[in-house]
Amino acid sequence: MDEIIDEFRMRIKASDMETFADVFDEATLMALYELSRKGYIEALGGCFSTGKEANLFHALAKKDDISEIAVKIYLISTANFNAMKEYILGDPRFVGIKQSRKDIILAWTKKEFKNLKRAEEAGVRVPKPYFTKRNILLMEFIGKDGIPMPQLKDAELTQEEAKHIFNRTVEYMKLLYSKARLIHAAKLPVTDHKLSF
């Protein structure tokens, strides 16, 4: 097993290992190796986004006609556990889950995968979710040749483009609520809510 972990570590740049020591624990490296062995990941590239809960890496894929993917790795040791726990324990899809840090974060990974699927099925443009294993979520890479598309806050838009994006976002919010039965980035008190657009 140590040889397997060492082999996979060699694929990750030394600088990334120092910066993201919390990301690449032994269990995560084993899960990445398994995903590679099964053909989901050809090569893991550098990190293109870091956060309190997860880091995103670019990777080359082996499967089907997919050439690039995003690999989202949730941080077991440093993620915002209390916020995740509140969302997971209130979700009927995860009744009976253990309340340890690891179990909550693994459930959170599955929850994001399921939510992306629901949003996609409702017609919302989200990164296409491909596969999840442990604290790793594989999904569509929005970009090209390892360079992610800019975030909206960094994009230079004309007034007409900004208006178009705003209107599209409102349409996606409607679909997310009416068809997927999801509300993004909001935890509402337990009452009867009626939203209108």
Image (tube, rainbow, N blue to C red):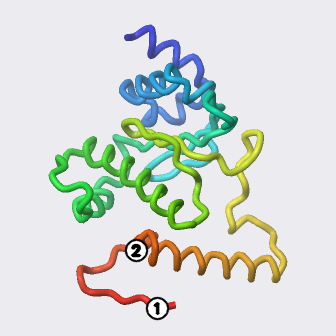
The quarter holding residue 172 reads bottom right
- The three-letter amino acid code for the residue at tag 2 is Ala
Near-viewer residue (56 or 126): 126
- The three-letter amino acid code for the residue at tag 1 is Ser
Near-viewer residue (117 or 20): 117
- Quadrant occupied by the N terminus: top left
Q: Position of residue 35 (x, y in %)?
A: 48, 27
Query: How many residues crowd mark 2 within 10 Å: few (<14), some (14–19), many (20+)?
Result: few
Residue name at image x 45 percent, y 12 percent: 4
Outermost residue to the top: 3
Query: How many residues crowd mark 1 within 10 Å: few (<14), some (14–19), many (20+)?
Result: few
Q: How many marks?
A: 2
Image position of 66 with respect to 30: above or below? below
SS for dot 2: loop
Image position of 148 with respect to 167: above or below? above
The quarter holding residue 48 reads top right
Q: Position of residue 159 (x, y in %)?
A: 81, 82
Residue name at image x 52 percent, y 41 percent: 138
> Which residue is identified by label 2?
186
SS for dot 1: loop
> Which residue is identified by label 1?
196
Q: Position of residue 116 (x, y in %)?
A: 48, 57
